[in-house]
Each structure stands twice: as structure tokens, then as C-alpha cells.
Amino acid sequence: MDVASCVQWIQKTPASNEAELADIEGAFYLSLVDLGSQEGVRKGILDSSPRWLQGHEDKERYLRQRVWLRIYERFEIKVLDPRAGYHLRLR
């Protein structure tokens, strides 16, 4: 299979708006939230009570010592020739 003749990878900007442009690093959008200083985000996590937080006795203290890192990339895969590839089915 010649991948270049089957599909085309189209890299797109990860920013959704002008405010996000400052947080772009190459093809990635990096969002870093200090949970120690962002009370609203921390409260949202506590209110949603995720399973990964249940094992911690002092959930508030645990979150205050953490950051929340989100990394986004936006791309499109355009199929150039759908008959040029193979479909493998595993059992």
C-alpha cells in the first residue's frame, strides 16, 4: 500500500480563537491550569467527583498541589483513493 496515494494528512491550527494563539507551540495548543490558584476549575473537578480523585483523603489539598495540562492538535485526514488501501479484520 502506498500511503501517500491513499490519504493526505492536513495539519490545521489548533487555536479556536485569537485568545488561544499565545498558547500555540508548533502544531499543538497547550493549556496549563494551576489548580492551586484557579478555584473555579478546582471546584468543578471536586463537584464532578471523578473516580481518580476518590483514593485521596484530602481531595482539596491534593488538587491544590497539581496542575491540569491539556494538549490539543487539530488535523484532517483526507481520503484520496478509498480503493487503494487494505482493511484488516482481526478475530
Image (cartoon, rainbow, N blue to C red):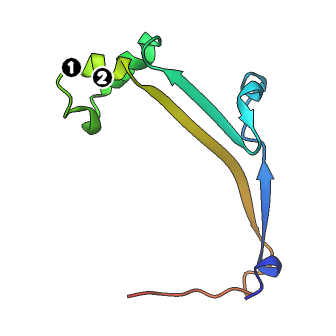
Q: Is residue 89 left or right of residue 83?
A: left
SS class, disc 2 = helix
Amino acid on which the number 2 mark rests in the picture:
Tyr
Packing grade of label 1 (10 A; few <14, some 14-19, many >=20) is few
Amino acid on which the number 1 mark rests in the picture:
Asp
**What residue is drawn where x is 25% and y is 22%?**
59
Image quarter for residue 26? top right
Q: Is residue 84 left or right of residue 69?
A: right
SS class, disc 1 = loop
Q: CA distance from mark 2 to mark 1?
A: 6 Å
**What residue is drawn where x is 48% and y is 87%?**
89
**What residue is drawn where x is 39% and y is 18%?**
42
Q: Quadrant of the N terminus?
A: bottom right
Query: What mark, if any, has residue 85 been given in the picture?
Result: none
Q: Position of residue 73 (x, y in %)?
A: 67, 46
User: Is 58 located above or below residue 50 in the figure?
Assistant: above
User: Is 83 located above or below residue 12 in the figure?
Assistant: below
Q: 83 or 3, which lies in front?
A: 3
Q: Is residue 44 left or right of residue 71?
A: left
Q: Are marks 2 and 1 in contact (CB under 8 Å)?
A: yes
What residue did someone put label 1 on?
58
Q: Quadrant of the C terminus?
A: bottom left
User: Is 73 located above or below residue 38 in the figure?
Assistant: below
Q: Position of residue 29 (x, y in %)?
A: 68, 37
What residue did someone put label 2 on?
62
User: Is 13 located above or below residue 9 in the figure?
Assistant: above
